[in-house]
Image (cartoon, coloured by chain):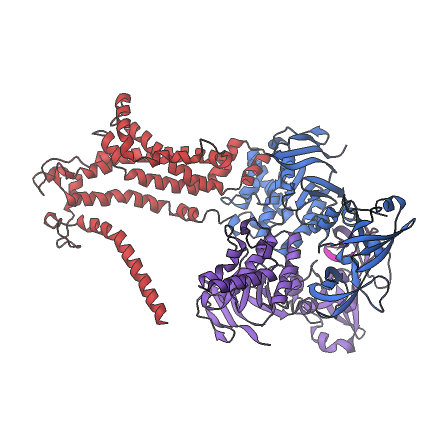
Amino acid sequence: MEYLEIKNISKKFGEKIALNNISFEVKEGEIFAIAGPPGAGKTTLLKILAGLITPDEGSILLEGKDITNLPPSQRNIGMVFEIPPIYPDRTGFENIAFPLKIQKLPKDQIEKKVHEVAELLGIKHLLNRQPSTYSGGEYQRVALARALVRNPKILLLDEPLRNLDAKIQENMRSWLKKLQRELKTTVIYSTHDPIDAMAIGDRVSILLHGNIRQTGTPPEVYLRPQSIDIAEYVSIPALNIFRGAIKEIDKEVVEIDIEGILKIKKKLSKTAIEKLRKGEVIVGIKPRDIDLHMGPPSENTIVGKLVLTQTIGSETLISVEVNSILLRAIVKKKLTSTEESKIMLTLNPEKIYLFHPDTGETIYS
Amino acid sequence: MTKRIISKFLRYIVIIAFLAWILIPVLWMFTLAFKSYPEWRVAYFFPKEPTIMNFILVFEPKQIIGMMGATALVDPVTLPFINSLLVVGASTVLAVIIGFFTAYGASRYNSPGPFSLFFTLLTRMLPPATFVTPIMVYYANLKLLDSHLGLIMLYSAVTVTYGIWILKGFIDQVPVEWEQAALLEGATHIQVVFKVTLPIVKSGLVVSGLFIFLLNWAELLFALVLTNVQAVTLPVHISKYVGAVGQLYGPQAALGILSSLIPVVIGYLIQKHLVTAFTFGMVR
Amino acid sequence: MMKKLIVENLTKRFGDLVAVDHVSFDIMEGEFFSLLGPSGCGKTTTLRCIAGLETPDEGRIIIKDRDVTKLLPQERGISLVFQEFAVFPHMTVYDNLAFGLKVRKTPKEEIKKKVLEIAETLNLKDSLRKVAGRLGLSEKQRIAIGRSIIVEPEILLLDEPLTLVDAKVKEAMRRELRRLQKELRITILYVTHDQLEAMMMSDRIAVMNAGKILQIGTPSEIYESPKNVFIARFIGSPTINLLSSKLTIENDKFSILIKDKEAKIQVERKLYDDILGKHVGRELLIGIRPEEVEIAKQHMQGYNIIGKIEFVEVMGEKMEIYVKMNDEYIRALTPLRTDLHEGDNVYVRIPLDKIFLFDAETEQRIL
């Protein structure tokens, strides 16, 4: 039995299927991230867990107890929304104290608990101020304090970092993770940004069009996506996708012609090769797996025209045109070539993905 | 460059003309109140011999007889003033309270259909003159004519529409997540309404209250038809200065100034809320 | 190359607050220039002054040799795109693109010609008859840009146009915008709080804070040689490590002792005397980018700092490791490794040739 079990949850709004047969488990004390593009159903899912939306089907078990039909007030689940629930007409203290006042705790206890949580989150200076004077990050901290003050069994965070400055997002995320490690609260974290999800999550679930498509540790999901849509979703910068023609198949090696740009040979298992019988395959290459080629051209070299360079810190994202096909790559060393000049690239055949042309399923060796 | 100066000049002309159009009648009333009897009908602004006689007459109407061409006695202003405060105050409070809950329901659970919010405007689509007679007949049977209760019921029913529409605008601005957070924290729905939403839209209550108060404070037609002696309101009383008793323009203007003092004082007292209301939704 | 925009000593005050404090810069023709800084640093006010939406208290704005400081927005030859793309949702793409020309009373045939031309470059030709409100974000962005450049502005001002877009789409749009700008040779002034966005698109960046421009340079110049602590911290993701330390002299060598860590970095005195000589005895901050920090599980030559892994963040094929040493953290960005776990004791190496040194008090860079 896991700490939280979600079993076969479905939800429709009118004709539109918001969530389709969602099942997953969350372990006590972990950060479980749910990543999916806007409109995938993340907020609906979190609100179902909180009890704010009733699912059409399925059940939710917390510590083995079925809470599916429990009203939100009796679940002891805290939630921080994308619009933080900080009431503009009262101070930080009054906002954080709100849930305790509802529970009719004695005044001195409220005082003590609010100060404790404020100390922990480093927001003591915000207690006596009006929310209109807060910055974006401060809003989220006070909202978090309010959710944590009653010591919830699970903390749901719905895109808590959206609408913050990029730099503040980054700092808040590691601050949040550090805080979670101290408190050991079980956290479910939703975000539209796959990188954000992988960075904060101990495990990540990919939610696409109302379906949980894959759940695993960040490296599992990132390095071994089960299908083309997951691979496309988790890859930022965008995955290079090409049509590939199977040229030659023998017992364990296939040769794939990638749109005339490159021919690669790949060693595959028998079952994998079986799936390539159609003679077609979709090839996915992460920009990070393509790099500059040094020295004389060899088998895996691609020659093209550099059309765009974009600095990412010490690395450079480049767009290269090869036979009127655009290829994106991340160059790790300092780039000396200028735009419009010729450039040589190379890639490791082991790192390319093969997807089934009909099902989109990833074919691993 | 000259083109710009000309356009600036024209802009000022338009603004000044517009202001004059609005302000001159008010100014006229103001100066009239300080004019003595012979000057009332003369078309100049400032009184030659300023007097406060008009104000005194409002409170001591006995002196009117024989003066200024008055032919009958006007009642003192005291009773109509108290009536107005009572009727308008009570109906405003009632309209805001009912308006808030209706607006809350409309904002949170509005379902399209025959009972859409649009129909609350129905009472405002008919000219009041068309339904004042049926109401009079009703009230006569219910013994509500010339009663405070009758006026309060009617005033609050007619103006609640404004309360609903103004307050819905405010409640719509309160994210539903703010309420859901409180639900999660163990609050009941009633607690959510009273402890979360209501305090947040406080300034909206005050603004819609002021607006409704102003409407009812100046209402004449219903009061004229439905009251007689006991429940006469200030506008009805003011209207009596011109008519059967004569043409008492001066005291009428004086009473106009006095009557507008109440809204001005209220507006001053709630200034803070007005500012909040106008910037509402921007704080988020 | 010609200067398209010159901003001289621009100052704007709101009451006691100096929002823009003697800001000067110029933008070349065809250049993508970014104003980068945190919320409230004055970048948007600067842009609004250039657009003519705010009146500066001091300074001059020159667009293509013409002093426009006192001119109205429509007389300046600029176009502006806001956070919410200025696309009329009820109009067709064609009417949206033609809007600026129509209000300028351009002849019909000319409008048609120009709209078709711009639709071609922006890849909107097939959508011309569609209603703009129904299109996707990327198309809306292209329409907004098309609308702004069809009137042939001298300079296009963009105020955080990608803020509301989600991460996936944002990345593609950055590429698209940069490609368009190059192809059409548009001069762009871009305002953003996102350092990655600025780096990925700009020819040059001006980093702003508290109303002042702190540094102007190409993306790699700013990344590789930040002038002070603020810039070093603001540019680059993950954020640079800054370790408190003290500079002393030992055996004719400069010795930088990292606080509480019994670790020190030593360099020959002769080589660095001009730079470090005057800072002896002072508190310094050592700056080291996380991707340069090296981590080992066993003690090796040069891995002098001992710490414990507090937690890791996986960023795709890389991972950011938070190593705790006493009460300070050091972050390292490494390729994905399976041998490092939370709670492990590790040894950290800081390569000497990759460090920045800042004076702890003035926060200015000295090496």
Q: In the image, which lettered chain appears purple?
A: C
| Span of residues in magenta | C321-341
The answer to whether residue A164 is seen in the rendering is no
Instruction: Please state the horizontal and vertical placement of residue B88, each as a whole percent of the image.
Output: 31, 35
Q: Colour of chain B?
A: red
Residue at the image position 31 percent from the left and 62 percent from the top:
B12
Horizontally, residue A71 falls left or right of residue C13, namely right
Instruction: Please state the horizontal and vertical placement of residue B101, each as a whole percent of the image.
Output: 45, 33
Which residue is most to the left? B66
Horizontally, residue C250 falls left or right of residue B110, namely right
A104 w.r.t. C337: above or below: above
Residue at the image position 25 percent from the left and 42 percent from the top:
B259
- For this rendering, which residue is in front, B263 or C273? B263
Is C340 in the magenta?
A: yes
Q: Point out the image quarter for the N terminus of chain A.
A: top right
- For this rendering, which residue is in front, A309 or C335? A309
The part of the image, by quadrant, that contains residue B100 is top left
Q: Colour of chain A?
A: blue
Is C38 in the magenta?
A: no
Instruction: Please state the horizontal and vertical placement of residue B106, each as a whole percent of the image.
Output: 47, 35
The answer to whether residue C293 is seen in the rendering is yes
Residue at the image position 26 percent from the left and 55 percent from the top:
B20
The part of the image, by quadrant, that contains residue A151 is top right
Instruction: Please state the horizontal and vertical placement of residue C327, each as a whole percent of the image.
Output: 72, 54
